[in-house]
Image (tube, rainbow, N blue to C red):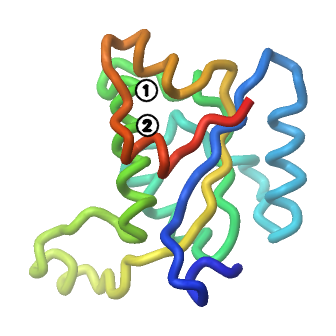
Amino acid sequence: MFLKPLSMDSFGINWFSYSSDGKTVLLFGAASVDGLLGDDGLPGWGDSDAGFEDQARGHSDSNFPLDEAADGKDDEVSLAKKVHRLSYVIGRNRSRKLSKRYEDANALGARSFHVIVQSTSERALGQVAAAAGRRRLRGAEVRLLDIP
């Protein structure tokens, strides 16, 4: 991967289009190049924030596929909030800070990563935010781009 050697921040692309238009096939192709396809399939938007951070570290210096934004709808955290949080986590190239004592006690060590998130959705993430009565901030828009 070229992000770290070029001192580039992580970023993401949300490929959006109609259902059954080949978006997931695109992710399978990208993930297979790096050997990221496992028995569990692709990571998805339904995963937790902590899960995103762990997977980003696990996919460091490669693609981080994230399938189907519609799976991210749950009662605890809205998809619009997940999109916002993930946008800034990938832009920082590291997980959220935890207590130093906790990090040391659990031998968490380096928690940084450089990834290119590739997400799929039937709607642009800007539309997801608007449907939740929110507006995407410019910083979030440039870190996680909507591409039809």
Q: Position of residue 86 (x, y in %)?
A: 42, 48
Q: Is residue 61 above or below residue 53?
A: below
Q: Is residue 101 above or below residue 63?
A: below
The residue lying at 37 percent from left, 85 percent from top is 110
Query: Which dot marks residue 107?
Result: none
Three-letter amino acid code of the residue under disc 1: Leu
Q: Is residue 85 above or below residue 105?
A: above
Quadrant occupied by the C terminus: top right
Three-letter amino acid code of the residue under disc 2: Val
Q: Bin the neighbour count of mark 2 within 10 Å (Cα to Cα): few under 14, some 14-19, many 20 and up.
A: many
Label 1: element kind:
helix
Residue 93 lies in quadrant: bottom left
Quadrant occupied by the N terminus: bottom right
Q: Position of residue 147 (x, y in %)?
A: 69, 36
The residue lying at 68 percent from left, 51 percent from top is 65
Query: Which dot marks residue 83?
Result: 2
The residue lying at 68 percent from left, 71 percent from top is 62
Residue 14 lies in quadrant: top right
Q: Are marks 1 and 2 in contact (CB under 8 Å)?
A: yes
Residue indicated by mark 1: 79
Between 135 and 90, which is closer to the camera in this rendering?
A: 135
